[in-house]
Amino acid sequence: GLDVQRPFHLGEDSIGVVHCALGILTDGATRAITVVVGVDPAASGVISNRATVAGDDPDPASENNQATVQSTVTRVADLSIAKTSTPNPHTAGTGITYTIVVTNDGPSTVSAITVTDNLPNDVAGLSYAWSEGVYSSTNQAWTGLNLAAAGQITLTVAGTVPVTQTGNLTNTATVTSAQASDPNPANNSAQDVNLQAALVLTKTGLLDMTVITPAHIANVGDIIRYTLVAT
């Protein structure tokens, strides 16, 4: 956006060049113009802006008729990460899928981030799928993005829990970006705890159906059939 403080007649052409008609400027007089512009969320590095003045009369020192200001643009992006796993609880010897969602709460756009996800050593046969850009599981860098403010991207990691696995599976994923400073680093990590499926054993006992006793109370010599169910 462009906001020009207008003490004089100003205008902006189709390519964003601001023109100002200052009128008569007497010897020693000064005119000040303030132009406020919005920086593109995807901008980075150094922005250079040049202003030039010219008049109808000849100028004996035209070398000072222009001035340039350079401004360094720093990206600011509040990145956050969330992580879930399914199924939860898990069962040894079966598959497990982790889903990581990275959100950019702005205001700047980022095109490269690093998602560090140190998966449990017991999870094997890993495969990766991502919604945008390119993710490298080797260096955990996620590049080729256009993650604008309010945008989200998803990384899915699938693997297999070994049959020898015991206990819960716990791991933490983090997100960072060298392109932008993050005003809220507290939401740059997320932990997932996937519980081990519990083994439950139930036992029931019934008299042999051929035995009839009051209130199904067993007597000496009766046959009782026990049933064990493990889940």
Image (cartoon, rainbow, N blue to C red):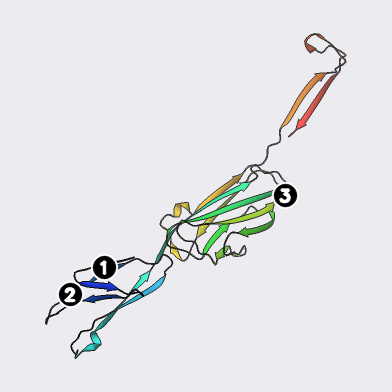
Q: Residues within 10 Å of mark 3 (few under 14, many from 20)?
A: some
Q: Which residue is mark 3?
A: 162
Q: Quadrant of residue 107?
A: bottom left
Of labels 3 and 2, earlier in sequence is: 2
Q: Residue furthest left?
A: 27
Q: Residue at x 37, y 74 (%)?
A: 47
The residue that label 2 is drawn on is 31
Going 74% across and 28% down the picture, which residue do you hit?
A: 202
SS label for mark 3: loop
Residue neighbourhood size for the residue with mark 2, other residues' Cα within 10 Å, grouped as few (<14), some (14–19), many (≥20): few
Residue 46 x %, y %? 38, 74
Left or right of residue 35, residue 73 in this image: right
Q: Against 71, is 222 above or below? A: above
**Residue indicated by mark 1:** 4
Q: CA distance from mark 2 to mark 1?
A: 14 Å
Q: Which amino acid, by three-letter code, is at mark 3?
A: Pro
- Tell which circle, 2 or 1, labels the residue nearer the N-terminal end: 1
Mark 3 or 2: in front is 2
The residue drawn where x is 27% and y is 76% is 19
| Outermost top residue | 214
